[in-house]
Amino acid sequence: MKIVSLLLTLVCVMTFKVTHAKIGYFWHITDFHYDPLYTAQGDTRRHCRRADERGSSGHHRALGRLGDYSCDSSLELIQSALRYMRTRHSENVEFVLWTGDIVADQYSSNEDNRYQAIRNVTELLRMTFSSHFVFPVLGHTDPAPSETLTNLWSHWLPMEALQTLKNGGYYTIEQSHSKLRIVALNTNLFSLGEANGVHARRQWEWLDQVLEKATTNNEMVYIVGHAAPGSDSRYNAYSVDANTKYLRLVRRHARIIAGQFFGHLHVDTFRVIYDKEQPVSWAFLAPSVSPHHDPAGSSNPGLRLYKFDSDNGKVLDYTQFYLDLAVANRAGAGAGAGAVAGAEWVAEYNLTQYYVLRDVSAESLHHLADKLRIGTTQEMTMFYKYLRAYNVRHESADNCDGACAHQHFCAITCLEHIAYRQCVEAAASALAASGRSASLTAPLVNMILTLIISIVVL
């Protein structure tokens, strides 16, 4: 009886700890690429802007009011996204991560015009989250740090954060009610053109001091930035030296880093960081609100809502939401002026259920990455689940051969530039030797995708 009583006591204690975790939520939004000149009467050859008389010969298709896969975001698309965000867990949302590329790169060379566009989007966010903090970071299409930009965001950030934001585009926020610290980076300073400058050096010194202080104070840290570390065949946002330095810093402080959150690629993917072959940290790259990404890619607009333990910052899960842009535009055709008809954002998937993860950790994501290698039928099914999410259910997910699949695996697991190149080359040699470099058959792809689409986890 004593043993039974002891076991019941232990169960009660464990239950108490689990049920009394303070559950909170936060949004991650990224890459709006807002284009104030977008119009449904525009021409895709002109970034969906209105053609002049000489260029309006009718040699372009009809566009949707919510946007087009060939172009950046319309105002209506951004408004519909923010309107939907306000309806989800509003009472438990603690903050919003906003990771840059606010304005379309091709919008205007006039600085005043770009600031006005950022001011308009900032005001929309402030009205949407009137009682929440929004933590913005700079993307590569955004203006350089300035007093003007700092003033736009002064209602969200304390004085100390505003000072470093104005001088270098980075800052840190201590959550007063928990042991969680948010570290917002200016990843533009990691690029080849900026990595050796004085502002980059000051950010490295500042970042090292912030992480050392967090370690001393037993704080957990979220690192937030626009571009993630690593190598991808389409983008190398960091210089080789900056990439190496960042990974070294993460390995040294992996114990206190509860998560890394980035955008930039406009796709849904993740990264695993290793130390002596052991997975020690992870980064999530959220898909964009903009439906277009260079050089010629497309995805459906996406929003992400994280679930976390707000006492210690541990990420517990996330739900990915999306808008089927093609369906929304068809449903909204003929809607009255000012309406955003057809903009039905829905849950695409839930992370832990979709990928059958035990938890959100470097080890679990390492095992997931290992399952993405093309091999057995089970691995192929998991890879196509990942690929379907990668482009947020856009039809471009259909086209990926064996070499493409291995490039995804290499990008996720080999963040050093040399390691990534070696991984891709080794995979290419293995595929060539096995004769499996050709595209996987379309019927098999369609069968797997049909199966995936039928499993929607809310």
Image: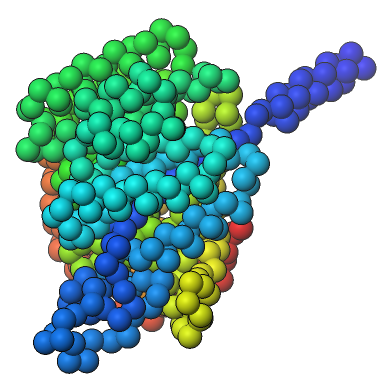
Residue 326 rendering spot, x and y as whole percentages:
42, 77
The residue lying at 37 percent from left, 52 percent from top is: 120
The residue lying at 23 percent from left, 86 percent from top is: 60
The residue lying at 58 percent from left, 24 percent from top is: 311
Residue 240 rendering spot, x and y as whole percentages:
11, 35
Q: Can residue 208 be seen in this view?
A: yes
Residue 243 rendering spot, x and y as whole percentages:
18, 33
Q: Which of 266 and 48 is in front in this view?
A: 48
Q: In this view, does 431 lie above or below 257?
A: below
Q: Nearer the viewer, residue 61 or 157?
A: 157
Q: Quadrant of the C terminus?
A: bottom right
Looking at the image, which residue sits at the far right?
Answer: 1
The residue lying at 50 percent from left, 81 percent from top is: 335
User: Left of 58 or right of it: where is 330?
Assistant: right
Residue 239 rendering spot, x and y as whole percentages:
11, 37
- Residue 254 occupies which quadrant of the picture? top left
Q: In this view, does 194 lie above or below 296?
A: above
Q: In this view, does 352 lie above or below 11?
A: below
